[in-house]
Amino acid sequence: MQNIVIDKPYKFVPPDPGMFWPRLLGRFVLPRYLRSSQGVESYELIGAERLRRSLDARYGILLTPNHCRPCDPMVLGLALDVPIHIMASWHLFMQGRAQRWLLQHCGVFSVYREGMDREALKCAIDILAAARRPLVLFPEGVISRSNDHLNHLMEGTVFIARNAAKQRADESPPGTVVLHPVAIRYFFLGNVERTLTPVLEEIERRLSWTPQPGRPMKDRIVKVGEALLTLKELEYFDAAQNGDLATRVARLIDRILIPLEEKWLQGKSEGEILSRVKALRAAILPDMVAEKVDEAERRRRWRQLADIYLAQQLSNYPPNYFNPEPTVEKLLETVERFEEDLTDVARVHRPIHAAIEVGEAIEVPPGRDRGKQGDSIMGQVRQQLETMLETLRARRPAGRSS
């Protein structure tokens, strides 16, 4: 399990409001960091004029990108070329003083995902209402590593936008809040066979297999995925399960989460996997943070948190992601997920090209507008993101294979 859950008392980390460090770091540090640590060697920005119109109009601006790679915030900071504020999980601030300083001085502030964080909400609303810098929120909530699949979008995003719009509407003269969906699409420009073969061979050896370099790359990946799923089924069901992959994954997620929900939440929770995961963490962690449990109970709860993390990771494998034939990026993403789920770290592959598109502005009214399918604004966000991601897919740099 990656170190994303912290059993220490939470303390809000505010952003540095200055402009000097974001501009300096964006110009001299981010390009080098993205090349060396993330493999991103080039980028392009589409729709910059849409953002410029909102900036010139002095709107409160909320940017809502998809979240498929850990480097998404840095790519945005580099490509947009304007200082931004970003809401980010608190655990990122707990990885050392240097990273904490860097995040704060890039305009990032913390949010506690395991509970209600009123300070983070107030900070986000105030940033939008002040309209000095755009605010970035990732409505998917977690990194998916699935560039061609958009997860459920959390409606807390529009809650923040509407509250900021209400504040701005009360000003004299009234101000406006707009939301720009932002699509991020990555292209792997290297040789995918040569890149993924050593990773797959290592995973195959972990499974006690003889590496199978003669098989098509897609077939090897599918076989590894089925083996890893079967191993988890043997762990949690004591037997391999029947059905297609989507059914088996959903069944395994429920096998993990439902007993915990019955213990901690008085029964199975409805809704998306991420919401169920968040509710369980919010129930399990408080006594650990308050040091009200003994060591045996702490170890038991850490095992439960690891199980919950597994359920979350399983939900990030989209059903039928390889149908029809997978792109180079789908092959790469899937193997990266395998490696990350087995070791907590996915190695860097390069070269990667990032294409970023800023969508049309969506004006946010202050009133509540919830239909049967959720807030209508989030429906517009999803529609724009899906359309832009599909369009960006056709913008592969010339001369590169697909």
Image: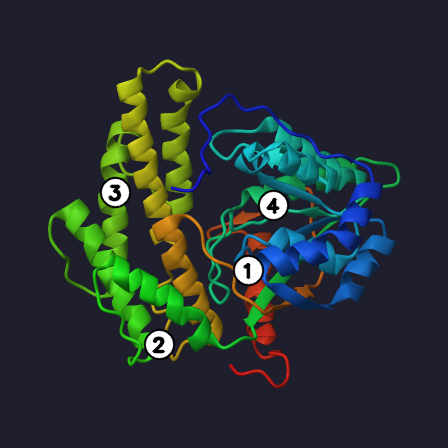
Q: Which residue is tagged 3?
A: 256
| 2 vs 1, front mark | 2
**Which residue is painted at 63% across and 27% down in the image?**
119
In the rendered image, the vertical position of residue 167 relative to residue 78, given as above or below: above
- CA separation, marks 3 and 2? 31 Å
The amino acid beneath tag 1 is Arg
Q: Earlier in the sequence, mark 3 or mark 4?
A: 4
Crowding around mark 1 (Cα neighbors within 10 Å: few <14, some 14 to 19, many 20+) is many
Q: Which residue is tagged 2?
A: 217
- CA separation, marks 2 and 1? 32 Å
In the rendering, at what x and y percent does residue 156 appear? 56, 42
Q: Which residue is tagged 1?
A: 382
| Closer-to-camera residue (298/262) | 298
In the rendering, at what x and y percent does residue 373 appear? 47, 53
| 4 vs 2, front mark | 2
Q: Is residue 319 visible?
A: yes
- Are circles 4 and 1 on residues that touch, CB within 8 Å? no
- CA separation, marks 3 and 4? 31 Å
Q: Which residue is tagged 4?
A: 158
| Closer-to-camera residue (59/4) | 4
